[in-house]
Amino acid sequence: MREGSLDAPTRHPIRWQDPDFTDPEKIDVELRRVFDICHGCRRCFNLCDSFPRLFDLVDESESGELDTVDSKDFKPIIDACTLCDMCYLTKCPYVPPHEFDLDFPHLMVRYRAMELQQGKAGWIDRQLTETDRNGALGCGMSGIANWASDRSNALTRGVMQSALGVHKDAALPKYCAKPFVEQTKAAPPTVNAEAPAFGRKAVIYATCFGNYNSPEIGAATRAVLARNGVETEVVYPACCGMPQMEHGDLARVADSARTVSTALIPWIEKGYDVIALVSSCALMLKFEWPLILPDDPNVKKLAGATFDATEYVAAIAAKEGLAEGMKPLEGGVTVHIPCHARAQNMGRKAEEILKHLPDTEIKVIERCSGHGGSWGVMKDNFEVGLKVGKPVARDAAKAGNAYLVSECPLAREHIVQGMEKLDGKAPDLKSLNHPMQLLALSYGI
């Protein structure tokens, strides 16, 4: 037996259709096996709050070991996991192919799948994950929805905290008046035939966030790609299912995978690459879906053709070269590399593309923001998320740059809130929140 592993991490398919997957006794045995190893290692003490909760639970037990810990006390540990994958990817020496075979995040998903099967998953929590339904409603009444969800609206936010469990101070994404897919029905941007990468074709998977909340990210991506000679189309068949995965609803994730892959395969067959606008969604298409549906040929083919938006532009820069015409951005840029971009194991692509901005100072922060998707806006988690993300907020405030961007716009807003908590006031930042928007600004498009 080796102490730790120098091999690249690998992952097993998620056997969610196997009856043993949600068997309570088998899950408890596996939790105890994994928690005992984690308790003896403790390398993950400074990641999410799951590990401090686990270590405190064991340390405060009668024996100081896991044997005197009651299994009913495990739930707060499971609830604190945000599925960021950083323990699996960056810290744990015992992930496959090591014989200890630890995959902490997927074990948390397994526990949540058991809770869902037992009817213990909260009804309200599940309604908050219905991003397509909520997005369609939110865009249809964006004025009212954005008014009601604004942090300054003490009345409605108080009601939301009491009724929905959403913390009254958590910044929530706004809804646009017209979804991104509808906006793209107008004339597409003119493709630059003089660009070095002219001839490339890509279909942009809008993602629920890009479609309903932040279409400006998609518009900027499309404009930058057109300037670089890439013909684009925009498609949004459905959400990737990440919100459902967070709650263990793997059957719903599988349905999303089948729906989206079926819609995108014809584009791949016509020679188009696939670009996801948000890093969490790119992670689902590239890595999680093939583990949930390992025998689906469409899912496998889509995974091999999918790029994160920044990853795709970085590939153009490395292979053909970017089109000329970028101007400096005054005031400097702080770029946050979010967990789900890091989990794609593709390198710091946001940093790579932003380094092409002429005469522009770039500060990189590569650490968890503490947001964790919908997890970070909930009443029980918001303050914990700010605590986890405090080092990021402190570094961003210290940098003092005019721009703060992240491949995860939700993480960016959480960092801004952390900066507010440090200084007691909103930081003086430009409103752009994604690296692709900075490229578009630099190009003047």
Image (tube, rainbow, N blue to C red):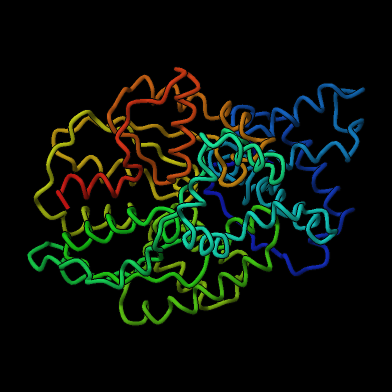
Q: Position of residue 125 (x, y in %)?
A: 70, 51
Left or right relative to 431: residue 7: right
Residue at image location 60% in from the left, 75% down from the top:
295
Q: Position of residue 5 (x, y in %)?
A: 59, 41
Front residue (pair 54, 329): 329
Residue at image location 48% in from the left, 60% down from the top:
208
Left or right relative to 228: residue 72: right
Q: How many marks?
A: 0
Q: Is residue 320 above or below residue 2?
A: below
Residue at image location 16% in from the left, 55% down from the top:
321
Image quadrant where one finds the N terminus: top right
Q: Position of residue 287 (x, y in %)?
A: 52, 60
Q: Quadrant of residue 185?
A: bottom left
Q: Is residue 422 above or below residue 65?
A: above
Q: Is residue 177 visible to the viewer in this orientation of the structure?
A: yes
Left or right relative to 437: residue 228: left
Front residue (pair 183, 218): 183
Front residue (pair 425, 348): 425
Q: Is residue 342 above or below residue 59?
A: below
Q: Is residue 438 above or below residue 366?
A: below
Q: Position of residue 229 (x, y in %)?
A: 16, 65
Q: Is residue 43 visible to the viewer in this orientation of the structure?
A: no
Left or right relative to 125: residue 238: left
Q: Quadrant of residue 311?
A: bottom left
